[in-house]
Amino acid sequence: MSDSHDSVGIVTAQTAVFDTPLPLNSGAILQGYQLRFETYGELNAAKSNAILICHALSGHHHVAGRYQADDKAAGWWDNMVGPGKPIDTRRFFVVGVNNLGGCHGSTGPSSINPATGQPWGSAFPVVTVSDWVYSQSRLADRLGIERWAAVIGGSLGGMQALQWSIDYPERIAHALVIASAPKLSAQNIAFNDVARQAIITDPEFHGGDFYAHNALPRRGLRLARMLGHITYLSDDGMGAKFGRMLRSGDYRFGYDVEFEIESYLRYQGDKFSDAFDANTYLLMTKALDYFDPAKSFGGDLVAALKKASAQFLVASFTSDWRFSPERSRETVKALVAANRPVSYAEIESVHGHDAFLMTDEPYVQLMRAYLDRVAREVQA
Amino acid sequence: MSDSHDSVGIVTAQTAVFDTPLPLNSGAILQGYQLRFETYGELNAAKSNAILICHALSGHHHVAGRYQADDKAAGWWDNMVGPGKPIDTRRFFVVGVNNLGGCHGSTGPSSINPATGQPWGSAFPVVTVSDWVYSQSRLADRLGIERWAAVIGGSLGGMQALQWSIDYPERIAHALVIASAPKLSAQNIAFNDVARQAIITDPEFHGGDFYAHNALPRRGLRLARMLGHITYLSDDGMGAKFGRMLRSGDYRFGYDVEFEIESYLRYQGDKFSDAFDANTYLLMTKALDYFDPAKSFGGDLVAALKKASAQFLVASFTSDWRFSPERSRETVKALVAANRPVSYAEIESVHGHDAFLMTDEPYVQLMRAYLDRVAREVQA
């Protein structure tokens, strides 16, 4: 596949190795770690045009472009990042990073634990959104970026953008918090727990040390992903795309795949279970559950956000029921009460939670307009 | 526990054995079968005061009362059925039946297949809502009931009430269709498929023939039930009851049970996985997926309901997102278009789908008022 004029083109991932110990919220300390990342565009002389893209549950550092011309798929946000795209790589230096605990090149449960020479597995510490932000700040140091023009993320990525604004107020000019929430609801946690239990109770999980058993808890991970997908799509969107369509003409009165929606979910589950690390999945869902920036401020989100000095864009999607517009409005209300400048957009979309990855025109226009403003500030 | 004045008291289950072959929608024929059932109240001389209660996914024939004075729990709808209760056993002869394919005494996958002398297991045929109604009509024959004063059910039970009105218009005076839908959405089917896949991919399932292996697919059934429970409760109701409450004071940075909602779900899952048959769970969810009374009328629900001559009560609950009020309104609109008399109530409740089992006062009043009317017709 040849690269079009608005693609960042062929990209190469890089690795940053850190040998300074990283103390984590849990009390554990990682003696050393590495972060896998990619960059697109050029850092300007003032080092003022850098944007950090934070990924969601199953994302990674490969945000845009292709590794090889014939790669089937481009980076996960290639529709949003590139020359002339809303996150315009002619104007911005864009950084994508695989989070600590990930399974795409950054240190995580499937990495070798130097203390044992074996994969970390169950011994890998649980990390939090705040830990990620901390580790990302060290990457920023390494890249010579004192202050991000913007930190941007959808879903769990939006939580990182919000946490950046609280933990490093002086290092972030704009936080773009998309399809996210200030903390998970009981229902959100419940879905995560079913997913985790599917993985943990898979006999092939071996208490998290499946690597040593040459096993993979595929069944559990597959179920987790199938369930996840239901919460990423809207009821209406699923209805429009799949409805009650059958793969063959009529009911077959058995338990093989029958409805198109079953076929779609099982395919998604199968694909994911071959590619993703089960321990990383557990860890990412736990970071979601734990995220609650108000917690260390006595439950007062306004007090937490008073620490911030960034400007905010908060965006939600009408059909997103995983992190509904109501959840984004909680963030907006707290920002307003904390006297922080915030723009809020509730975008009409049938794409549910997944809309943050899609190209609904009002969303693209919003991002383009907001980032135009960020770019003008950078140049000013 | 002593029985209060409004309880049906000590009850005894009965078994009706049928040796007339039962042809099923799938094309399979059950040569013989039995139905487990209970009755409360007295059938009047005109045999005009009989009410059939149809159960939902995990329900059964034990609707009201206790088998022994010290039973911890009464029947599943004891709050609605009894002397002086909305379904008043001083006025009505109430019948509860365990559906064919069930695991509470009616013939099902865990019953002995006379052809092999072994449990049916995977050989038990898939049954539909229409098959259930057919088998229930034979039970009505056996009991001498030509026409039900009402057929009542919530969720999957409501689908049976609707199907009764279409399949046997002359045999049902009133259909009470509560927290139900005229067919499942793609999202509904998706949740069912994840539950089924959890069971089917459990290594202890053995293709449905786990009885022969002296095994139980507990892990799969547990996950299915945990997931089910999320869809039975509302986001708000779960938030009010559990929120983000932790079992111990603070985060523990591990994968053991931590949030109260996790504890609740796992307990529900554990309890269910010890008590319910996995093949019955599969079969019940499949009956849900297949339910679509419009299907044999070219997809025209109005045409299907034109066959009915019953009067209808359709009720939904505001916080029910499994079968939302919108789905009940589809039924109501089709009934109106089919020129059938229908009352519709959209009941304010935080209890989600489970509200049909609960005792929200407006719901109780509605049922009482409607069944008063049914009782007066019986006496007239």
Image (cartoon, coloured by chain):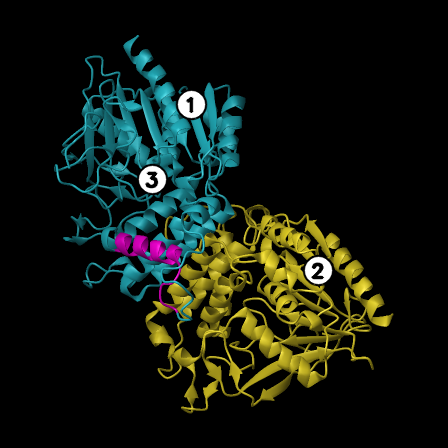
Chain colours: A cyan, B yellow
Residue toward you, B28 or A208: B28
Kindly identify which numbered label has been placed on residue A312.
Answer: 1
Q: From the image, tell me which residue sits under label 2.
A: B312
Q: Secondary structure at mark 1?
A: strand
Is residue B146 visible to us here? yes
Residue toward you, A303 or A28: A303
Highlighted range, magenta: A255-273
Residue A328 lies, with reference to residue A44, above or below; the image says: below
Same subunit, tags 2 and 3: no
Q: Position of residue B96 (x, y in %)?
A: 66, 75
Residue B85 picture quarter: bottom right
Callout 2: residue from which chain?
A: B
The quadrant of the rendering that contains the C terminus of chain A is top left
For residue A24, side relative to residue A311 (left or right) = left
Name which residue type carries label 2. Phe
Is residue B376 covered in magenta?
Answer: no
By secondary structure, the bulk of the magenta-drawn segment is best described as helix
Kindly identify which numbered label has been placed on residue A56.
Answer: 3
